[in-house]
Amino acid sequence: MFCCSTAPSIGYSFPVSEDSRPNPDALLADCASASSGEGRLKIFLGMCPGVGKTYAMLLAGQSRQEEGVDVVIGLLETHGRIETTAVAAGLPRIPRKAIVHRGITIEEMDLDAILARRPALVLVDELAHSNAAGSRHPKRWQDVLELLQAGIDVYTTLNIQHIESYRDVVRQITGAPVHETVADSVLDRADEVELIDITSEQLRKRLDEGKVYLGARAATASANFFREGNLKALREIALRITADKADGELREFMRSRRILGPSRSRERLLVAVGSSPFSERLIRLTRRTAAANHASWIAVHVDGGVTLDSASQARLESNLTLARSLGAEVVMTSGTDVVESLLRVAHENNVSQIVVGKPLLHPLLDIFSGGSLVSKLVRRSGEIDIYVVRTEKSVAPWRPDLSAIHQPGLAREMGIGSLVVTGTTLLGLFLQPAIGYSAVGLLYLLSVLFSATVLSQIPILLTAALTALAWDFLFIPPTLTFHIHGAHDVILFVMYFVVAIVIGHLHSRLRQRERAERRREQQAVALYQFSTALAASPDFAETMRAAVERMREIFAADISILLASEDGQLRPDAVAGPPVSERELAVANWTLTRREPAGRFTNTLPQSAGFHLPLRTQNSAVGVLSVFVPANAALRLAERQMLETFATQLALVVEQSRLQDEAERSRVEERSRHLQKTLLDSVSHEFKTPLAIIAASLDRLRQRPSDPQPLLAEIGTAVGRLERVIGNLLDITRIETGAVQPVLAWCDLHEIVDAAAARVETEIGPRPLQREIADDAVKLDPGLLEEILVNLLRNAAQHSPPDSPIEIATDVSDRGLTIQVRNEGSGIDAASSERLFDKFYRQPGAAAGGLGLGLSIVKGFAEAHGGGVIAQNRTDGRSGAEFRVFLPVATQPASALEHGQ
């Protein structure tokens, strides 16, 4: 067995240098992980069925139970294996939940029962299993994630063919399709992965002994999936997955302890990528070296803040695209010190070798730059090996970079530098008799320092050179010549020239670093504002529109977001932004299918007008971000990197929205199934009882036809109960479909109350009905009002003692009619207060009978009049419930109604 795990961090105290300073994002991730309170996940991984994953999981559970940990079996599949059943003995199990789907009863893991039980550790077999329809989550691994979020540790089992990214590889090896998969993010989420490893010979022996499959199934498996070549290939994949997991956790361990790499447990290569044509050869060589050593590799570009011309920018993007296509992990960072940045990335990623090209500068020129990149890396790399690759003869020799002299505003800055030199010279000529020529040199030095705060590098160096020459020619004896006699003056001039040049260079680097920091700050602010805009939007469509508007402001380009439909194609109309043409839609569909950028600024369909980025999630692409930059503008590398970040965030938003929609649909379906089951149960019970009474009465009539009246009365009661059930179902259907349209007429409240009381006389029984009815006439639907009163009186009778009174009162005002019905029962408990008016809900302790629709009908008919109903416990100090119905209807005195007004 092989096991890799992530241990909790332990704090150490030591001085922090600039090179070892921790990544702020990593520290935030550590803090979030430490404070999440989630459970730990351990996966027992196998190359295929039968290697003993479940057996090993149960043994680990038994061991934890012996340590005093509360361990339960959430779900176990023994597949009839005697050894597995035996090792599970003594571990408590959570009973499975029965789910009926299409007439078939399926038993699944009872997630709610486990959450209610809250064990310290739960064992869940077969992580990739798909749950039956009607379960809260479609996949078992989603159940496991909910358990982890609740703070419960989980042990589970998984075969490599069920990992999403390896599904196609396993299918090509074995020829067997894989239908159930687990997202790779779940494997990344695991705190510990234990590989249950046996040789192919041992597994085939277990298969022959009937320990994997039985009978004909074992023979079929041996001839197909369990062929020796298949098993060896699957075992290699399983070992590689575990090794990659262990390597990632080792890097995380070293980072959390701030241990500078490399760790020699596994080779990891880094290649420095720039805009040079030679970088392409470096990338290919690094890929070959990594493949030969079975090592992973990363390509790193350091943005030093220098603006590249269009040709260099295109070469850089081409080199990074090549690295991605060859399987490199591309890292882009920024910093004025390229060596420091490369070594920082190397230490963070446990790199053992750095691949660089031989320097092209003449050795004498290295003196002025502090040494070549290779020499600096060799001096400062520590235990990291430096692999230096020779330059091809086809690569052009070094030539000085003269692109800076074409930068905009250079002539104006040179003019400012010349004016500074002229002004300082005039001031020096005026002050020289009083301060001497040596102090004039300090004035020149001060002017260079001032110029360095406002000018770029070339004007600063020009200003420094001009001040040195002017000081020598006009002030250092002998004047009006460049000849210097005294050794003191020679040393003074040389020192001045060196100090002026160094000051100018340092100030130039500081300004360059300032610009780089300002650019990073702008990117961070833009990313923050973009994230804020996404989070602040009330719904999905508004979120997409806000994203488009924000990106349009940042990039000064037209933006469109296209989302994939259920058939995996982009819809022609954009979710946000202007619609795209058919040609650009075809390019976007290529991007969606291949999950790679395409269009302008790429090597794929570069003649397109738009730059198309896939909105990639862990397993698929959910849409495309299309960017249409003006024809005369370019997309810089930093802008492209920011766009990729925005695309990642948009993909997460889209995926989250789809998951929410799926969860909402599941909740609606579950609620519908629950209501359907409740309706069937209630209706079957309500029909069964009166039908039984009718049948029994008819039998007795046949036996004793001489005295039919009592039996006919029972039949009439039963028929009335059936009519009431059917009437309630029809009423609730009318309410749900919006078919209730009140027919208003002037009514006498006394008549309506009398009619309602007569209909529920049997249910009320001996309970006295205390009335306080207003004499005013009201204009409403008398039929609907009668149904409201019938259901309220029936509900009051069901929840009160047989000899307690029921009170009904009405109050008429200018605002409308208020009806109050009270009883003296147990009242309304807190758990029922919010659900009283839900369909099919019956308060605990209610008398048998009824569908639980009466109060829903009251609410629906009241709202049809534009009113409402509230329920509460009595406020006069007595026990019992109180219902108030308000109907905003027209009223008038009863005398006006009698006179026909």
Image (cartoon, rainbow, N blue to C red):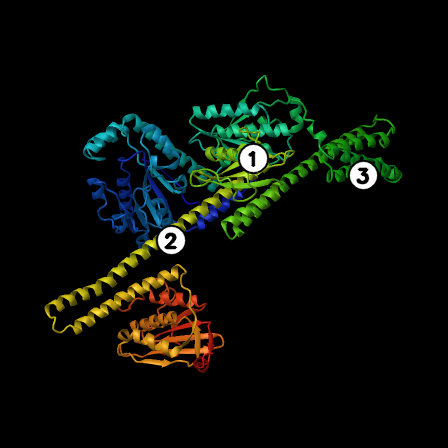
Q: Residues within 10 Å of mark 1 (few under 14, many from 20)?
A: many
Mark whose residue sits in front, 3 or 2: 2
Instruction: Give the residue type that dot 2 points to.
Output: Val
Instruction: Give the residue type that dot 1 points to.
Output: Phe
Asked which quadrant contains residue 462, the reply is top right
Q: Report which residue position mark 3 lands on.
A: 443
Residue at 48 percent of width and 46 percent of height: 653
Residue at 86 percent of width and 26 percent of height: 481
Q: Report which residue position mark 1 lands on.
A: 611
Q: Is residue 869 visible?
A: yes
Q: Residues within 10 Å of mark 3 (few under 14, many from 20)?
A: some
What distance separates the C-alpha of mark 1 from that of mark 2? 40 Å
Most foreground residue, 840 or 65: 840
Place of residue 815 in the rendered image (x, y in percent of width and height, measured from the top left):
49, 74
Furthest-left residue in this view: 703
Indicate which disc, 3 or 1, sits on the residue closer to the N terminus: 3
Most foreground residue, 399 or 147: 147
What distance separates the C-alpha of mark 3 from that of mark 1? 54 Å
Q: Is 773 above or below relative to 660?
A: below
Indicate which disc, 3 or 2, sits on the residue closer to the N terminus: 3
SS at mark 1 in the image? strand
Place of residue 862 in the rendered image (x, y in percent of width and height, measured from the top left):
41, 68
Q: Report which residue position mark 2 lands on.
A: 668
SS at mark 3 in the image? helix
Place of residue 159 in the rendered image (x, y in percent of width and height, measured from the top left):
32, 36
What distance separates the C-alpha of mark 3 from that of mark 2? 81 Å
Asked which quadrant contains residue 629, the reply is top right
Instruction: Give the residue type that dot 3 points to.
Output: Leu
Mark whose residue sits in front, 1 or 2: 2
SS at mark 2 in the image? helix
